[in-house]
Structures are given as C-alpha cells and as structure tokens.
Image: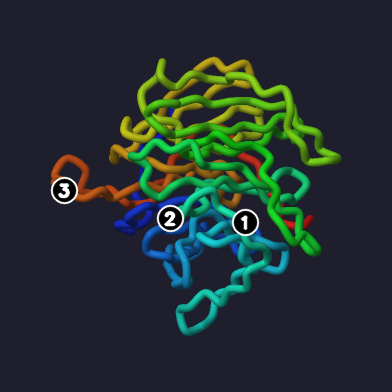
Amino acid sequence: MPMQAELILDARNSVGESPVWSPRDQALYWADIPNKRLYRWNLADATTQSWEADEMLACIAQRADGSWVAGMESGIFQLSADDDGRLRGERLVGVSHARDNMRFNDGRCDRQGRFWTGTMLMDMAAGARVGALYRYDGAGQSTLPVLLDDLIVPNGLGFSPDGRTMYLSDSHPSVQAIWAFDYDIDSGTPHNRRLFVDMNDYPGRPDGAAVDADGCYWICGNDAGLIHRFTPAGRLDRSLEVPVKKPTMCAFGGANLDTLFVTSIRPGGDLDDQPLAGGVFALQPGVRGLAETPFGT
C-alpha cells in the first residue's frame, strides 16, 4: 500500500512548481515562482540550497552539463547557479506576449530533449485566453513561434514513455480539461487534439503532471489535496492524498525513480487547517517513473 505523504521540506513556497529529479546530482530541484528562486534538495543528506534569479522562474529543464534552461517572464533563459546564491542568467530567446504582465508557467522537455512551455496572464482571475504554447529546440532558434493558443493557464505537460503522445491541461476553473495529442517525434509537432480527461468530473483543478513507466498520467488536483493517476485510456486508477489543499506539480525521483515528489502553494490567510502549505512532499506510489530527458539531447 502507498505510504502517507512525507514532508521533505517545510519550504513555505508561495508557488512551488516544476520539480525535476536530477539523476546526475541525485537531487530534486524546483522553483518558487513569485520569489524568483531555484531550490535543490540533496537525497544523500537531505540538505537544501537555493538561488535567486532576476525574473520569476516558472519551469526548468536540466542540460547534461548540469546547467538549466528555464521559462521565466521575458523568454527562455540559460541559468547557472553561482556560489553567491545568485542564478546567472542569459536569455536564449525572447517571447512576444499577447499582453503585458504575462509569464511562462508549466514546462518540460519531450523525450527528444525539446523544451515545451506555456504562457499565462499573471492575473489568473481575469480568465483571459491569451496564453500560448511554445517549443524551444536550442541553438540557432531566434524566435518562439506559437504552436497552440487560446489558453488561459496552460499546465500538465507530459509525454508518454514512447514520446508519441503529448498531454496538456488548462487549470483555469472555467476550463479544467486535460487533452491528449498525437506527437510526431521527428518534427516535434502535436496533432489530433482530443479530450483526455474532463477534470470537472473529479476533485481538484488539473495542475502539473508526470508520466510513469506504465504510461499512466499523474496530475495534481489543485484545491483538492489529491494526486490522481489516470491510465492511458483516461480511466481514474487511484488518488493519493497530500496534507495541503494546493499541490502544484509532481515528479518521479529517488535512486530508483520510485518516489513521487510534490510541490505546493502557500496561499495567504488562515492556514490552521494546512500549516504545511508551500511544502515539498514525497510519496511511495508503488510504481516507477521515467527519467527526464536532458534539454538538447
């Protein structure tokens, strides 16, 4: 039976996001978006370090050399962690947002090492369909063409084990949908979009996601304190609890990729019923995940 969620760090993140397990470092990395910070939790000794960036840091993917690419506010950046606690950043490519006050949100690499990420208006309550989905392939790419638009809060990016199915969600309360696409692994192009799961039928809004070695899709049920596992056919297989209302994204990690790490949000107001909000948690779900493909592989 899966064990209860274990707190690995009472991080008190405003918006903890984008957990990524690094087999290279045997460590978990994640971002706190509004506080512009990158965190690292080391498996061997459970110590934590963090670094501050110049812009809001939303989603990350590691390169083979240990540096990072990241979706931030004004574009895709290359980041390196300095000893002085700063993230040294170089903008690789800018983005032409549809409106002011936008930033990147969820993102990850496909199985071939291309970086996918979406944008959103920071005022989520406005419900503006100005978000878009982009793909960054690497050196020589000077612009970010829009590959999908009409999104409010793009989230839940994931890829099947063979890379031929792409998943995407929209977290906004007016949408709450997860879609699947056929994915051309040669061109990096999604097509044949279809509804995978209508999350209006389940507790929680669809937030960040992970795919396990069986091809099942794990999605954080934001506002419900749950992590749902859906089979490739879109059937709910199980739901695991975390002791906070707003889990944001999950990632498989640990030495055997059999631990599910979960980041969360610490909202304002009375937190007597969820004092660990904004923490990072670990669960043993009884299945193994897949290693993230380094960017540019």
Residue 67 horizontal side relative to residue 81, left or right: right
Classify 10 Å Cα crowding around label 1: few (below 14), some (14-19), many (20 and above). Answer: many
Residue that label 1 marks: 61
Which of label 1 and label 2 is nearer to you?
Answer: 2
Classify 10 Å Cα crowding around label 3: few (below 14), some (14-19), many (20 and above). Answer: few
Whether tag 3 and tag 2 are in contact, CB under 8 A, the answer is no
Query: What is the distance, in whole Å, between disc 3 and disc 2 at their CAs?
Result: 24 Å
Looking at the rendered structure, the secondary structure element under dot 1 is: strand
Of residues 164 and 241, the one drawn nearer to the viewer in this rendering: 164
Measuring 62% from the left and 64% from the top, which residue is drawn there? Answer: 68
Residue that label 3 marks: 269
Type of amino acid under label 2: Asn
Query: What is the distance, in whole Å, between disc 1 and disc 3 at their CAs?
Result: 32 Å
Q: Is 95 placed above or below 167 here? A: below
Q: Position of residue 47 (x, y in %)?
A: 42, 67
The quadrant the N terminus occupies is top left
Which of label 1 and label 3 is nearer to you?
Answer: 3
Q: Is 216 placed above or below 29 here? A: above
Residue that label 2 marks: 101
Q: Position of residue 210 (x, y in %)?
A: 56, 38
Measuring 71% from the left and 53% from the top, which residue is drawn there? Answer: 136
Type of amino acid under label 3: Gly
Which of label 3 and label 2 is nearer to you?
Answer: 2
Q: Earlier in the sequence, mark 1 or mark 3?
A: 1
Q: Position of residue 117 (x, y in %)?
A: 60, 47
Spot the residue most to the front. 99
Measuring 20% from the left and 48% from the top, which residue is drawn there? Answer: 275
